[in-house]
């Protein structure tokens, strides 16, 4: 009888699926609606990963390009969702909704039926036919013009983005498409965020999600930049919003539609369950980490870092990636800032600066390269390596908003060891986060708590460095799949299990508070190093020395 009661209770449980589309792979997680318990996760690597040197047919790409292949996203639905549900032991009929999140701003040109241009006959060798990944930075010239013209005309929306528009965002990438491949621009019926495209494929309804529209599409107070403004950028761009961008805005946590028969066949989920409006990986993570009060900043650390925070105060924070009313939580201003390279920088160093002798030592003690360098670096005192680095290997997102900037390492000697450089790079990313926090607080937007999410939370040395550098206790999300959990929580709201995302966060969110505490002595030592970081930051980043931009132009000329 007990077993029967247990089975009846288990059958009565309901579940949601969250799918997180990242830079290199997609992950699906099956989550219990009642308490946020994660029953199973599955990951599917993108077959084509990131196209940053050539297209699948061998067509070469110039520097600063970063493209993807949309069929890789569908493969995640076909593979990871079914695997996760199978591993969970949940019966498909118990799943009541599916939610998704995506890297932003990842945008693609499609036809009216949603067909990506790169899948049309004869267009596989055209770079502009492919999705432009968030870290596609080849539209910097267009972004600079967008900013300069907005300043000249006094466009009020510019202040909502800290005074600068990024090359990563929708308008800059679309303007690059128009000016470099006008034929493909004309073929483009919809310029669409991947976050919205995948929802369209799941439920057959195309809505613009409020998050990417506000943060990446310059949609403020119910309007995009005006037709007159766009015409002043380029006469052929005047009708971009009306012809290719504008669609109904879907609110976060709302249902976009229901799962189609085709998508049900891909995923193994029941046709007709709720499909949530799309969202951004960082923003869905905030409620998953319990950050539902003003001043709770979440740093989602992976290949890059995105800093998101809700506040009851509006201010113009220099170099932020946007402030949107209700952009993360209803009733609060949602702020976003970020660093374009974090885990990517550590990965670059391991690929290029990890000697064979170190690899042998690591193998002998059962460590991978990152673990070995971390263990060696952990034995150092603050400043012992004599180095300072700038974390701009993929440009600077905040607070300078300049993706033509590049990395710097100062202090190298013939005695410098790989672990010295590795630690200096870890510290540089922490200095970048402190720069962002100080920008918020100087502007009058307090940061009350810092919570870390993402795969890098596993590196205890890195977390301690962040606590010491920022002089703040660090909380850590209680899930290894923060974005996917957050997407699942929004799906629970869309399916009607909770009245809003705050209620879902209280029931399903997970956070361990004050896990890493700052050490006063190390913090004082880092204050001295941070002062040097800020000198270099302002010298190279604020116009005193334009060497990085000159080198970028020389490289572009040599690559032409």
Image: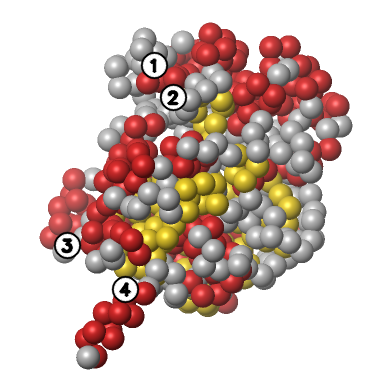
Q: Which residue is mark 1?
A: 120
Question: Which numbered disc, 3 or 1, marks the residue that appears first in the sequence?
Answer: 1
Q: Which residue is mark 2?
A: 115
* SS at mark 4 in the image: helix
For the point 63% across and 50% down, which residue is it?
Answer: 251
Depth check, mark 3 against mark 1: the one in front is 1
Q: CA distance from mark 4 to mark 3?
A: 43 Å
Q: Which residue is mark 3?
A: 366
Depth check, mark 1 against mark 4: the one in front is 4
Question: Which numbered disc, 4 or 3, marks the residue that appears first in the sequence?
Answer: 4
Q: CA distance from mark 3 to mark 1?
A: 48 Å
Q: Does the residue at mark 4 contact the one at mark 3 (Cβ under 8 Å)? A: no
Q: CA distance from mark 1 to mark 4?
A: 45 Å
* SS at mark 3 in the image: loop
Depth check, mark 3 against mark 2: the one in front is 2
For the point 60% across and 13% down, which residue is it?
Answer: 179
Query: How far from the left and from the top, in percent, is residue 499?
Result: 60, 67
User: Which quadrant of the figure has residue 23?
Assistant: top left
Q: Does the residue at mark 3 contact the one at mark 1 (Cβ under 8 Å)? A: no
Question: Which numbered disc, 1 or 2, marks the residue that appears first in the sequence?
Answer: 2
Asked if residue 325 is positioned above or below residue 226 in the image, the reply reads below
């Amino acid at each position: 009888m007990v077993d029967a009661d247990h089975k009846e209770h288990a059958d009565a449980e309901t579940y949601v699926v969250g799918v997180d589309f990242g830079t290199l792979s997609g992950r699906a997680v099956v989550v219990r609606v009642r308490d946020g318990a994660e029953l199973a996760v599955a990951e599917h690597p993108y077959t084509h990963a990131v196209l940053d040197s050539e297209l699948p047919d061998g067509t070469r790409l110039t520097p600063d390009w970063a493209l993807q292949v949309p069929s890789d996203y569908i493969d995640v639905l076909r593979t990871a969702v079914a695997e996760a549900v199978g591993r969970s032991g949940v019966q498909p009929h118990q799943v009541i909704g599916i939610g998704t999140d995506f890297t932003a701003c990842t945008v693609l040109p499609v036809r009216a039926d949603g067909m990506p241009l790169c899948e049309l006959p004869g267009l596989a060798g055209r770079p502009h036919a492919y999705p432009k990944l968030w870290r596609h930075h080849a539209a910097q010239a267009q972004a600079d013009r967008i900013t300069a013209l907005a300043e000249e005309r006094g466009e009020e929306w510019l202040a909502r983005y800290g005074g600068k528009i990024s090359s990563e965002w929708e308008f800059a990438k679309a303007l690059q498409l128009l000016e470099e491949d006008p034929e493909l621009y004309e073929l483009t019926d919809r310029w669409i965020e991947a976050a919205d495209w995948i929802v369209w494929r799941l439920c057959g309804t195309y809505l613009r999600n409020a998050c990417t529209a506000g943060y990446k599409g310059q949609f403020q107070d119910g309007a995009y930049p005006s037709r007159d403004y766009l015409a002043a950028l380029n006469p052929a761009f005047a009708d971009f919003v009306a012809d290719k961008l504008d669609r109904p805005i879907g609110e976060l946590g709302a249902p976009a539609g229901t799962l189609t028969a085709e998508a049900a066949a891909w995923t193994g989920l029941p046709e007709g369950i709720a499909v949530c409006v799309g969202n951004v990986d960082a923003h869905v993570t905030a409620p998953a980490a319990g950050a539902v009060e003003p001043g709770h900043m979440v740093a989602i650390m992976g290949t890059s870092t995105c800093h998101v925070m809700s506040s009851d105060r509006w201010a113009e924070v220099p170099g932020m990636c946007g402030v949107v009313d209700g952009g993360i939580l209803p009733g609060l201003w949602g702020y976003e800032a970020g660093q374009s390279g974090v885990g990517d920088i550590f990965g670059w160093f391991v690929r290029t600066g990890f000697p064979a002798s170190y690899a042998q030592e690591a193998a002998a003690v059962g460590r991978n390269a990152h673990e070995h360098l971390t263990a060696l670096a952990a034995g150092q005192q603050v400043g012992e390596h004599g180095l300072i680095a700038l974390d701009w290997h993929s440009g600077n997102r905040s607070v300078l908003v300049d993706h033509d900037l590049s990395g710097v390492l100062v202090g190298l000697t013939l005695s410098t060891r790989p672990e010295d450089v590795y630690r200096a790079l870890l510290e540089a990313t922490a200095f970048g986060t402190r720069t962002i926090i100080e920008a918020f607080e100087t502007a009058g937007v307090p940061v009350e708590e810092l919570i870390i999410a993402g795969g890098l939370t596993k590196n205890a040395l890195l977390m301690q460095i962040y606590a010491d550098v920022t002089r703040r206790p660090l909380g850590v999300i209680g899930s290894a799949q923060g974005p996917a959990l957050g997407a699942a929580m929004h799906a629970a709201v869309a399916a009607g299990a909770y009245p809003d995302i705050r209620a879902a966060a209280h029931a399903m969110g997970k956070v361990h508070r004050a896990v890493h505490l700052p050490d006063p002595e190390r913090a004082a030592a880092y204050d001295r190093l941070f002062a040097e970081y800020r000198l270099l930051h302002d010298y190279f980043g604020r116009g005193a020395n334009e060497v990085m931009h000159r080198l970028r132009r020389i490289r572009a000329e040599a690559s032409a």
